């Protein structure tokens, strides 16, 4: 796990300021989508070895939700972006 | 007598004697001593008893790896166990106590374990204490723990303070020996921001302990001069008495600074320890190397130590380890020790080496016994003699001596380079595990990289510092050194152990793991290095195998016919040396760990005699006893009845409050609640039910529309932070296209409920606007003026009690004044302050739910809110998943009221509901009581319950079973609204 996260709004900050929500590769389905699609969205998560996108909340900082792309093996952080800006 | 203080030399100050005590006995050392060197100078060879066999043990090292000399320092709350005597600076009044012995270090009953040792091999506990299973926890483990142990901690709180701090630098240099100092001098002259960390009280590392010269100065003088230069440099921060204990991602390092562990009187204004987190752009690991013990029979007697440690005691502390010293060395270290001993007039009786040839540069008087090993030793509490075995002939001879210096070669201290998961690599050429490849700017240099000659270390430190700084774009100014080119320090092949040892040949001194234990582990199939560690305990406890691991790997390699490269190392994890809980906790103790959160009306409630209850961090007013009331129930009953008959005022400020603005605010709120909000008129409040995406209820509260694009949401007290985070996620992640802004105002408003038939009369006296039922009907929500416009507040006609009720919010600072004004205006109307207990009674009587019911497993339908869920909205959080079959099933636990059949009987929350004729078992469970209280209006206990088919069973008799107390009473299921079911009072 990275020790430092470069928040696009606040700069380099210690990871303790953030709260991790998990997989950011999932997209909320449309209300018309099939039950199975919703089940997958709500309950099923991959645990990838290698690159992983996650939602991180800068809870003790700017309170923005970020998408952190990191390598679960090397712990390298490849990218940190504002979730809203990505959408 | 054998060990003694030399009359000259060393870095101690003989003009400053220091009195200290060991096991109560007064002793004296000098300024500059460690506890270990002072004990040795007093000929205290026996300093501890071993963990398992309680064998007498002496100092083995002069540094951080010390496995034997563990002592307890301090008294009561300052008790510090398992402290390495080698790392404790001697100071006035120091009192150290030995450990793991009874009744005394000299006479230890536990030493009988040594005689039982044939039965106490590896895996003994696992194999022996197997049956009966229940005995393990109750009998075996407590006895074993009592018998085998390290120091005993105190139960008295620690009076000292600790702190945590961040530091930032371009280049972190870990270790201030020759390599670290060379790196630091180059970095300092290059004007980079440097942090130089060393665990010692004096910087210099091995330079303080060796007799070599640099720039034509004795090494220690060179070190002192370097420190002067570095201390004067503004760009260099020196942290001495500081151990870097962990290396983490992004080059963040954890370091423990012992600020006041070496002082007689602790300054309360300073911490005793400081835990640093150092963020470095580049880091140089200059931690040096650890000397390996040799594994031979009886290799643990007091008087034996590492050859390098012997040089430290001799050259730095001016202590001779004995009068007749023998050396057992594989490689050059022992020969150097012999030279230094003889230079100080100490008799070296023999140098034993398994190598076939003598060290060419040794010119001393000692008898050289090459191609030989030590097979066994004699002596109990101090070493008396050796049995030397000639490898070629197998013949043995004995030799008297009182001290032995041993060296099995050197192991680079690679720990920090491996904390992030990289493994060290075995090198036959170095006869050692070398650090893994540099990673993210952390690079090992000097001894830590397997470089052993002084000249090469100085060169390596400077070169790597220059490279690191060059990477950072600094212009480099190299520091240059001249030193005698020492003989090429060639490492002989490793010598892992003496075959057929006489007596136990210890591998791990701290855990009493000997050669045979490792052999047993291999024979029993635990030959993988990680399994062997756990099976034998080799490499565990406070020293984590700093001396023993590499020898154990070599022994495993030989036993399995492979090489150390194949066996590999166990996992290196932080911390390098033990860290106190105090340092890790820092200032987060007591109220700084668990702060007290009080509402703006806390002082008001306190003034009126409130009793408080802790809910999470909050201290909430729970009831307000009046004079003459002796029992809490008396007060709560009175408060609840007064609210229903007259009026009451209650602090509800702890509710979460969120302001929501934006042109899409209504649409946003409509999507986060399951019920409709789009058409909520300005000036109105509405109860909202918030679901999770999986369809279960997350939280509830009221949301008021204060303007077209301005809403004010309240949440439950417990979920205030969670709901805000959830809403932020919804607005930023799910629907960033919606124009919404959120801000928490939980602490900005003091909010009070004014409830009861007289509530309007009282409020009318302070509120400027007309609040008649016509002008301010149920669920009205508007900004109002108070006391002729002196204050602006927000008034909501909402009710948790079921009475005619209002909630008034005023800016936090005005809370106390407004609440007092309402109390005094209400005096004639019979108003009473009431707390959370009466609030709870009133809401249960009215069938209102809280998180006692909304526990994460209930749906709107379970609570009778099924029809609130919008069928028209195209989308809201939880909409799709709520339709799942299981969440719509009719046999779910659903909300009902419950009362005892006999009003004289009562029940408690958590009781289970059973059929009248069902046996009291979990299998027959129909549901449970979620909330209960005594209803002063009905005169008996009432409750809310979640029961299978609940609403269909209303009127049925059931059993209320308290399984904990084995009590059952008869009860009746009923409507969950006990008071004013038609809501006439609410709308009055």
Image: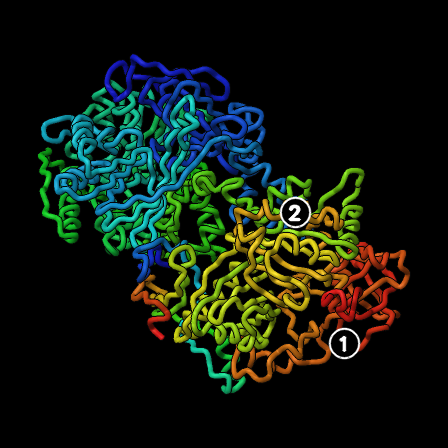
Residue B487 in the image: above or below residue A83? above
Protein chain holding label 2: B
Q: Which residue is mark 2?
A: B621
| Dot 2 and dot 1 residues touching (CB under 8 Å) | no
Tell me residue B867's x, y (percent).
66, 79
Residue B251 vs residue B444, the one in the foreground: B251
Using the rendered image, report if marks 2 and 1 lie on a common chain: yes
Residue at x 56%, y 62% (from the top left corner): B714
Q: Is residue B298 above or below residue A30?
A: above
Left or right: B498 as drawn, with respect to B11: right
Q: Which residue is mark 1?
A: B949
Q: At x 81% / y 65%, what residue is drawn?
A: B898
- Helix, strand or loop under label 1: loop
> Is B941 drawn above or below residue B255 in the view shown?
below
Quarter occupied by the N terminus of chain B = top left
Q: Residues within 10 Å of mark 2 (few under 14, many from 20)?
A: many
The x and y percentages for residue B669 are 51, 72
User: Observer-nearest residue: B770 or B929?
Assistant: B770
């Amino acid at each position: 796990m990275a020790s430092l996260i470069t928040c696009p709004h606040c700069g380099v900050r210690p990871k303790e300021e953030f709260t991790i929500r998990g997989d950011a590769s999932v997209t909320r389905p449309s209300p018309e989508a099939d039950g199975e699609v919703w089940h997958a969205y709500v309950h099923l998560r991959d645990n990838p070895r290698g690159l992983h996108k996650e939602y991180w909340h800068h809870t003790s900082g700017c309170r923005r939700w970020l998408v952190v792309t990191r390598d679960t093996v090397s712990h390298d952080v490849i990218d940190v972006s504002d979730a809203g800006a990505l959408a | 007598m054998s060990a003694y203080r030399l009359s000259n030399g060393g870095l101690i100050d003989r003009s400053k004697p220091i009195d200290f005590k060991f096991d109560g006995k007064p002793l004296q050392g000098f300024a500059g001593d460690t506890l270990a060197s002072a004990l040795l100078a007093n000929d205290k060879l026996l300093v501890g008893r071993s963990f398992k066999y309680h064998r007498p043990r002496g100092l083995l090292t002069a540094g951080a790896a010390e496995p034997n000399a563990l002592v307890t320092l301090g008294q009561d709350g300052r008790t510090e166990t398992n402290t390495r005597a080698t790392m404790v600076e001697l100071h006035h009044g120091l009192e150290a106590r030995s450990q793991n012995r009874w009744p005394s270090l000299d006479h230890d009953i536990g030493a009988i374990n040594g005689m039982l040792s044939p039965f106490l091999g590896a895996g003994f506990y696992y194999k022996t204490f197997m049956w009966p299973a229940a005995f393990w926890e109750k009998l075996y483990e407590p006895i074993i723990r009592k018998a085998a142990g390290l120091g005993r901690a105190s139960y008295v709180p620690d009076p000292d303070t600790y702190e945590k701090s961040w530091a930032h630098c371009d280049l972190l240099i870990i270790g201030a020996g020759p390599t670290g100092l060379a790196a630091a001098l180059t970095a300092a002259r290059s004007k980079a921001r440097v942090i130089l960390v060393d665990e010692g009280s004096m910087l210099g590392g091995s330079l303080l302990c060796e007799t070599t010269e640099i720039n034509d100065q004795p090494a220690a003088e060179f070190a002192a001069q370097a420190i002067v230069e570095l201390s004067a440099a503004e760009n260099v921060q020196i942290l001495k008495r500081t151990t870097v204990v962990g290396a983490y991602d992004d080059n963040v390092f954890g370091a423990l600074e012992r600020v006041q562990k070496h002082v007689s009187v602790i300054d309360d204004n300073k911490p005793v320890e400081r835990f640093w987190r150092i963020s470095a752009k580049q880091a140089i690991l200059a931690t040096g190397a650890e000397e390996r013990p040799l594994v031979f029979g009886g290799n643990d007697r007091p008087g034996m130590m590492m050859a390098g440690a012997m040089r430290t005691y001799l050259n730095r502390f001016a202590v001779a380890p004995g009068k007749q010293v023998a050396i057992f060395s594989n490689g050059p270290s022992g020969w150097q020790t012999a030279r230094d001993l003889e230079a100080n007039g100490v008799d070296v009786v023999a140098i034993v080496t398994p190598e076939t040839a003598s060290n060419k540069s040794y010119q001393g008087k000692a008898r050289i016994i090459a191609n030989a090993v030590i097979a066994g030793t004699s002596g109990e509490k101090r070493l008396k003699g050796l049995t030397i075995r000639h490898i070629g002939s197998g013949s043995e001879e004995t030799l008297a001596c009182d001290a032995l210096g041993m060296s099995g070669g050197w192991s680079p201290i690679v720990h920090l380079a491996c904390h992030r998961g990289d493994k060290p690599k075995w090198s036959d050429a170095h006869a050692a595990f070398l650090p893994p490849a540099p990673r993210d700017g952390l690079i090992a240099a000097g001894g830590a990289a397997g470089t052993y000659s002084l000249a090469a270390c100085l060169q390596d430190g400077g070169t790597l510092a220059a490279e690191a700084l060059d990477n950072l774009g600094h212009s480099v100014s190299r520091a240059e050194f001249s030193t005698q080119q020492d003989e090429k320090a060639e490492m002989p092949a490793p010598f892992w152990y003496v075959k057929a040892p006489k007596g136990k040949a210890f591998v791990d001194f701290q855990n009493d793991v000997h050669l045979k234990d490792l052999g047993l582990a291999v024979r029993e199939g635990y030959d993988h290095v990680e399994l062997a560690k756990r099976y034998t305990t080799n490499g565990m406890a406070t020293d984590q195998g700093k001396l023993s691991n590499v020898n154990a790997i070599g022994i495993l390699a030989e036993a399995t016919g492979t090489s150390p490269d194949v066996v590999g190392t166990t996992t290196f994890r932080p911390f390098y040396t033990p860290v106190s809980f105090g340092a890790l906790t820092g200032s987060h103790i007591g109220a700084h760990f668990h702060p007290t959160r009080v509402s703006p009306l806390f002082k008001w409630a306190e003034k009126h005699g409130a009793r408080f209850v802790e809910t999470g961090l909050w201290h909430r007013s729970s009831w307000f006893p009046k004079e003459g009331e002796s029992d809490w129930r008396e007060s709560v009953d009175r408060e609840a009845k007064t609210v229903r008959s007259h009026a009451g005022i209650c602090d509800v400020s702890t509710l979460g409050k969120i302001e929501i603005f934006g042109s899409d605010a209504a649409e946003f709120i409509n999507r986060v609640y399951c019920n409709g909000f789009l058409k909520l008129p300005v000036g109105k409040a509405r109860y909202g039910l918030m679901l999770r995406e999986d369809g279960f209820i997350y939280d509830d509260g009221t949301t008021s529309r204060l303007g077209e694009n301005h809403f004010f949401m309240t949440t439950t007290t417990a979920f205030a932070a969670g709901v805000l985070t959830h809403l932020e996620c919804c607005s930023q992640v799910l629907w960033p296209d919606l124009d919404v802004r959120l801000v928490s105002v939980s602490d900005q408003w003091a909010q009070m409920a004014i409830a009861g038939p007289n509530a309007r009369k009282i409020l009318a006296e302070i509120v400027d606007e007309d609040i008649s039922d016509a002008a301010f009907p149920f669920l009205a929500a508007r900004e109002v003026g108070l006391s002729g416009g002196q204050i602006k507040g927000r008034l909501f006609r909402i009710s948790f009690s079921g009475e005619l009720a209002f909630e008034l919010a005023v800016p936090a600072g005005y809370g106390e004044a407004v609440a007092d004004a309402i109390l005094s205006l209400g005096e004639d109307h019979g108003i009473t302050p009431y707390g959370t207990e009466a609030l709870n009674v009133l809401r249960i009587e009215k069938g209102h739910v809280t998180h006692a019911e909304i526990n994460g497993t209930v749906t709107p339908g379970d609570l009778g809110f099924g029809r609130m869920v919008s069928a028209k909205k195209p989308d809201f959080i939880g909409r799709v998943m709520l339709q799942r079959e299981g969440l719509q099933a009719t046999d779910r636990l659903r909300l009902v009221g419950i009362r005892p059949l006999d009003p004289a009987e009562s029940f408690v929350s958590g009781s289970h509901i059973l059929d009248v004729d069902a046996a009291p078992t979990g299998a027959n469970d129909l549901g449970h009581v979620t909330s209960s209280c005594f209803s002063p209006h009905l005169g008996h206990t009432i409750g809310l319950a979640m029961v299978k088919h609940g609403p269909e069973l209303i009127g049925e008799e059931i059993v209320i079973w308290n399984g904990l107390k084995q009590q059952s009473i008869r009860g009746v299921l009923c409507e969950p609204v006990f008071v004013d079911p038609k809501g006439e009072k609410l709308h009055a």
